[in-house]
């Protein structure tokens, strides 16, 4: 698996102006990693400042943090929980 952030060239079509309240026109889409089998359930945890997602066939949950505990930008993905016992309960 590759765990690094890369920007992707994407054109976003706004079908509803309400999207502008939560996504700025300058927002970009970033790929956080590759090599996962089937990911689902990204959940942002604001208190922990991280994103948790599952790779169900791999029976694993991963954590992505935009910054490390000391404030440096990392973008690293780490194993958060294994096994998941085939559940989607991350927290």
Image (tube, helix red, strand yellow):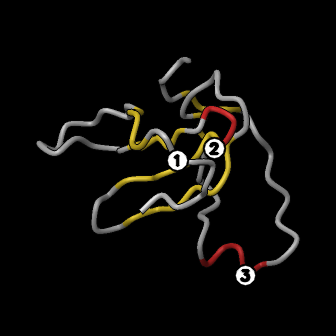
Quarter of the picture holding the C terminus: bottom left
Residue 18 image label:
3
Q: Residue at x 63, y 57 (%)?
A: 41
Task: Choose between 47 and 88: the one closer to the eye.
Answer: 88
Number of marks in picture: 3
Question: Residue 37 vs residue 67: left or right?
Answer: right
Q: Secondary structure at mark 3?
A: helix
Q: Residue at x 58, y 46 (%)?
A: 54
Real-space CA distance between mark 1 and mark 3, rounded to the nearest whole angstrom: 36 Å
52 relative to 64, above or below: below
Dot 2, how many residues are within 10 Å of its Cα: few (below 14), some (14-19), or many (20+)? few
8 relative to 44, above or below: above
Q: Secondary structure at mark 2?
A: strand
Q: Which residue is mark 2?
A: 29
Question: Residue 13 vs residue 7: left or right?
Answer: right
- Residue 79 position, x and y percent, is 40, 34
> Considering only order in the chain, which callout, 2 or 3, is on the residue closer to the N terminus?
3
- Residue 67 position, x and y percent, is 28, 43
- Dot 2 and dot 1 residues touching (CB under 8 Å): no
Real-space CA distance between mark 3 and mark 2, rounded to the nearest whole angstrom: 19 Å
Quarter of the picture holding the N terminus: top right
Q: Which residue is mark 1?
A: 84
- Residue 57 position, x and y percent, is 69, 35
Task: Choose between 46 and 85: the one closer to the eye.
Answer: 85
Question: Residue 8 vs residue 17: left or right?
Answer: left
> Considering only order in the chain, which callout, 3 or 1, is on the residue closer to the N terminus?
3
> Considering only order in the chain, which callout, 1 or 2, is on the residue closer to the N terminus?
2
- Dot 3 and dot 2 residues touching (CB under 8 Å): no
Q: Secondary structure at mark 1?
A: loop
């Amino acid at each position: 698996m590759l765990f690094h952030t890369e920007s992707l060239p994407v054109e976003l079509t706004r079908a509803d102006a309400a999207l502008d309240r939560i996504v700025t026109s300058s927002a970009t889409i970033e790929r956080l990693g590759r090599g996962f089998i089937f990911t689902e359930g990204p959940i942002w945890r604001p208190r922990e400042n991280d994103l948790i997602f599952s790779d169900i066939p791999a029976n694993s949950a991963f954590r992505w943090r935009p910054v490390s505990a000391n404030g440096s930008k990392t973008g690293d993905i780490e194993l958060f929980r294994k096994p998941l016992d085939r559940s989607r309960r991350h927290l």
